[in-house]
Image (tube, rainbow, N blue to C red):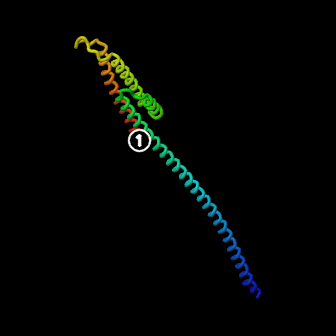
Amino acid sequence: MAWDWITPVGSGVVAVAGLTFGWATTVRSQRQTADLAREGNRHAQALAELAGEQGRRLEELRHEQAGSDRRGQRLEESYLEVATTVVRVSSAPLPDAEDLVRARVLVGLFAEGPVREAFDAWLDRFEKLRYALGKQAEAGDEPTGSTRDLHSPRDMWRRQANDARLKEVDARERLMTAMAAHLGRSSS
């Protein structure tokens, strides 16, 4: 009977060891759960930040695209107005100076270098044409002394006006080509 106390003590030790082990397992499980929860929170926060950053970038891209679309549309409208003005002014007997000023401003604001150069070349040719037509009108319609009088002021200015008209048409076509090329590059 000396050994009868071993069974209850052994059972008590096993019970205490089981409780201690259960408690230690629970504490370790709670720590692991807390660590996993913290890691999950950090991961969720990182995902939220990434989603927010991507959302902001997407919104910036949409804004840039809308701005680019508006610029492209404004460029197209400006070139259409410049082309209409150039054609109208070229065919008008007395062109409106305001139209030329507006066209020059639009070209200055929206056109690239080659278009500006083409517009300036056209404007130079147009001014020379207006000058030649004015001189031709000043020379009047008086008949020449001979059909061979090629040196009369009237015939000289008529030839100058015809030459200036051809050069103005060529410069106008170059301007239209330059504007079309710029529109083609900006829309692609």
Apparent side of residue 76 relative to residue 9 in the rendered image (left or right): left
Quarter-of-image position of residue 3 = bottom right
Residue at 26% from the left image edge and 15% from the top image edge: 143
**86 or 149, nearer to the observer:** 149
Tell me the crowding category of disc 1: few under 14, some 14 to 19, or many 20 or more residues within 10 angstroms, Cα based.
few
Where residue 64 appears, as percent x and y from the top left, is: 50, 45
Residue at 43% from the left image edge and 28% from the top image edge: 97
Where disc 1 sits, the SS reads helix
Apparent side of residue 38 relative to residue 186 in the rendered image (left or right): right
**82 or 24, nearer to the observer:** 82
Which amino acid, by three-letter code, is at mark 1?
A: Ser
Residue at 73% from the left image edge and 84% from the top image edge: 8
| Residue found farthest to the left | 147
Quarter-of-image position of residue 40 = bottom right
Where residue 77 appears, as percent x and y from the top left, is: 42, 39
Residue at 38% from the left image edge and 30% from the top image edge: 89
Give the position of the N terminus as an image quadrant.
bottom right
Quarter-of-image position of residue 79 = top left
Against 99, residue 26 (above or below) is below
Per the image, the residue denoted by label 1 is 187
Give the position of the C terminus as an image quadrant.
top left
Apparent side of residue 52 relative to residue 87 in the rendered image (left or right): right
